[in-house]
Image (spheres, grey):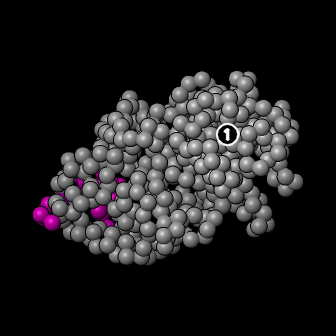
């Protein structure tokens, strides 16, 4: 199998042992699951299915970011406890993913379950000289880590612009460098607070995933995934603090899923231009939704349009009409091994159907159950 590696900027061999460890950044549960979420997680679901087909065992960890600025802000707006909001939206997310046929994660740890791990991790970073205390917070010192920028390959100006756009608080006067990022911070009056050696407060965003990955998967993981909007700052910062703490490589292979647009604009909660999976499930079969998304290659941005569901439903009906069989299975395997080329895999199944051959085994490998 060959996959594109974000850090190496090339399609390379995906070399793994019998057990494949994977970490994908999960949701911040303050709103419903949308097509962008589903598109991202379907990538790793198809990858898991092919790896299992090849005989590998997989341990997938997908976190729940149940303490972070967007969640706390939304809970404040709604006048509800942040954990109540998180629990409700996490349940809805899990229901939507189950409906779409995603394989379950080995574990879905919550950030709030790892406060002790996070405090210990921050201590490791401080002990290695890569962090400092200032103004009641603890910051990672990017100037101390020579490989900062290796994941994203961005220049300083690009980093600053994205950090400012994505919650990096680049104008924080306590920072030695605007790109330094917070590991621990004082809580506001109505925010959750935990005790620490650096004063009461709460963790920064990036440190949560590093601590959970270390706790659940060990020092080095085979594959780390998420949307391309997480490459910087989130994954860049994760890599820096993890390797600073342990002295070992953090990730062998970075795989990112491109964004889904609506009307030419990236679909996101902050913009509110969302198509919710729960709404689609009211009108369409889960298998058809899955086919509509799988018709797009994971590394290309694409636009959601209403006619995608009509085409996917027609494709599903055609596949079912062909009956059971293993036609196109070898072709689908080859397509998935070629950088998860699901559009070509679907086309191979279409060709087999057109020739009157059954395709249930190939459809199953793509996570599509042809039983109505």
Q: Residue at x 68, y 53 (%)?
A: 164
Residues 65 and 167: in front is 167
In this rendering, position of residue 126 left or right of residue 284: right
Q: Is residue 307 above or below residue 252?
A: below
Q: Is residue 32 left or right of residue 336?
A: right
**Tally of numbered discs:** 1
Residue 165: x %, y % from top left: 66, 56
Quickly name the residue at label 1. 207
Residue 214 in sight here: no
Within the magenta stretch, is there residue 302?
no
Question: Magenta stretch: dominant SS?
Answer: loop
Residue at image point 60% right, 70% down: 272
Q: Quadrant of residue 55?
A: top left
Answer whether residue 361 is magenta in the image: yes
Residue 295 in the image, given as x and y percentages of width and height? 34, 62
Q: Quadrant of the N terminus?
A: top left
Rendering coords of residue 305 (x, y %): 42, 73
Foreground residue among 333 and 145: 145
Kind of element beneath mark 1: helix
- Horizontal side of residue 18 vs 317, given as left or right: right
Task: Mark 1: give few (<14), some (14-19) or many (20+) Cα within 10 Å.
Answer: many
Q: Which range is magenta?
A: 354-372
Q: Residue furthest left?
A: 355
Taking the spot 34% from the left edge, 35% from the top edge, the residue there is 13
């Amino acid at each position: 199998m060959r996959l594109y590696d974000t850090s190496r900027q090339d399609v390379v061999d995906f070399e793994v042992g019998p057990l494949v460890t994977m970490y994908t950044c999960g949701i911040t549960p303050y709103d419903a699951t949308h097509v962008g979420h589903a598109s991202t997680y379907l990538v790793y679901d198809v990858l898991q299915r092919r790896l299992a087909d090849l005989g590998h065992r997989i341990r997938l960890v997908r976190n729940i970011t149940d303490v972070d600025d967007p969640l706390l802000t939304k809970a404040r707006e709604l006048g509800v406890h942040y954990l109540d909001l998180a629990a409700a939206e996490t349940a809805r997310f899990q229901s939507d993913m189950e409906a779409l046929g995603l394989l379950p994660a080995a574990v879905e740890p919550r950030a709030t379950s790892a406060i002790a791990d996070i405090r210990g991790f921050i201590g490791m970073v401080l002990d290695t000289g890569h962090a400092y205390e200032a103004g009641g917070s603890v910051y990672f010192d990017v100037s101390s880590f020579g490989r900062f920028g290796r994941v994203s390959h961005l220049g300083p100006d690009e980093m600053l612009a994205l950090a400012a756009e994505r919650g990096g608080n680049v104008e924080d006067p306590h920072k030695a460098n605007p790109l330094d990022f917070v590991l621990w911070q004082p809580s506001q009056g109505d925010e959750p607070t935990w005790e620490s050696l650096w004063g009461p407060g709460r963790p920064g965003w990036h440190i949560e995933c590093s601590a959970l990955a270390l706790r659940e998967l060990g020092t080095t993981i085979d594959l780390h995934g998420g949307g391309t909007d997480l490459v910087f700052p989130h994954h860049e910062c994760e890599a820096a603090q993890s390797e600073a703490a342990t002295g070992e490589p953090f990730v062998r292979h970075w795989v990112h899923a491109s964004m889904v647009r609506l009307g030419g604009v990236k679909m996101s909660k902050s913009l509110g231009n969302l198509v919710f999976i729960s709404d689609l499930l009211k009108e369409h079969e889960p298998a058809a939704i899955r086919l509509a998304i799988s018709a797009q290659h994971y590394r290309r941005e694409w636009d959601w349009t209403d006619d995608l569901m009509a085409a996917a439903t027609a494709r599903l009906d055609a596949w079912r009409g062909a009956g059971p069989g293993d036609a196109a299975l070898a072709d689908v395997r080859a397509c998935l091994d070629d950088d998860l080329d699901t559009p070509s895999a679907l086309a191979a199944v279409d060709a087999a159907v057109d020739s009157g051959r059954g395709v249930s085994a190939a459809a199953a490998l793509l996570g599509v159950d042809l039983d109505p």
